Amino acid sequence: MKMSVKQLRAFLAVAHTLNFAQASAQLNLSQPALSLAIRGLEESLGGPLLLRTTRRVTLTPEGATLFPIARQLLADWDNAEETLRQRFTLQRGKVAIAAMPSFAANQLPPLLKAFSDRYTGINVTVHDVINEQVFEMIREGRVEMGIAFEPEPSDTLHFTPLCTDRFVAIVPKDSALASKSHVTWRELLAMDFIALQRPSAVRLLLEQELLRSGKKLDVAFESHQLVTVGRMVASGLGVSAVPALCVKQMGELGAQCVPLTAPQIEKRVGLIRLAQHQLSTAAQALADTIEQGEY
């Protein structure tokens, strides 16, 4: 039989007080039960730990060796219990999430603020990465969940839709297109087009959808970042198309957003995690906060 936490607590109480009566009171345990716990520990370890006479209790050499070890083991055990208790009650914890840039820079910050206000002890790490890397990080276990465009049907990923995102045109504020109620792709593609670089899911989605409509995406300028695309458009270098999630961000960068039609391109955005995987308590609380958001 292996030693138990209860036996170690009994031994430590006696080793501290060198008095069975005091140790029994400290543990709220009867002396026979205390003696039984000590005897069980000695049997499991293979020899006596305490010498008990009518006058006093002393530690054997082996008992003296166990004393500091038992103290450290119980301290570690108590710390582990408290840490897990705090995690389950959301007093402490960590959660990592990956999100595509359009969501990470626009919708995610206010959601994190609401989460942080409620769970002040939870640390959140956000990985702002392209759509494909969101899937990759989830599959590799580097994050518990992610936010991205809906993936292809899969046995490994579970998708919870949050909203349907529609692409809009972004044009310079002094452009003739800026005052229109909507812009067609034919009008937009007549101008220099600024696109995200491959393998961006936004770039690939636009190319695929336009190809279905018999249109080709000719690119004049490319960038890895949506922020750079917005600034390039605002500077008059050309036009672009971005998810509607970015409308506020593009306006802050100085570009004008206009509804885009013919064809109208849209894609569902949602919360993604591994299928058949239970989220940690902290991650589930964050997922609930995200799912309750307004989009």
Image: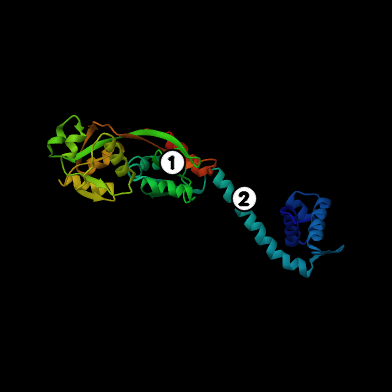
Give the Cα distance between marks 1 and 2. Answer: 25 Å
Give the residue pinned by disc 2. 81
Locate the N terminus by quadrant. Answer: bottom right
Q: Which of the 4 image quarters holds residue 150? A: top left
| Residue 165 placement, left or right of 151 | left
The location of residue 80, given as percent across then percent down, is: 60, 53
Residue at 77%, 49% in the rendered image: 29
Q: Residue 215 placed where, x, y %?
A: 23, 37
Residue displayed at 72% across by 59% down: 12
Q: Is residue 19 left or right of residue 72?
A: right
Q: Secondary structure at mark 2?
A: helix
Q: Secondary structure at mark 1?
A: helix
Lateral position of residue 164 relative to residue 184, left or right: right
Task: Name the residue type under label 1.
Answer: Phe
**What residue did someone put label 1 on?**
115
Colour scheme in use: rainbow
Where is the C terminus found, in terms of image quarters? Answer: top left
Residue 93 visible, this angle:
yes
Q: Residue at x 40, y 34 (%)?
A: 162
Nearest the eye: 90 or 54: 90
Q: Which comes before the other along the chain, label 1 or label 2?
A: 2
Task: Between residue 46 and residue 69, name the one nearer to us.
Answer: 46
| Three-letter residue code for mark 2 | Glu
Q: Quadrant of residue 259?
A: top left
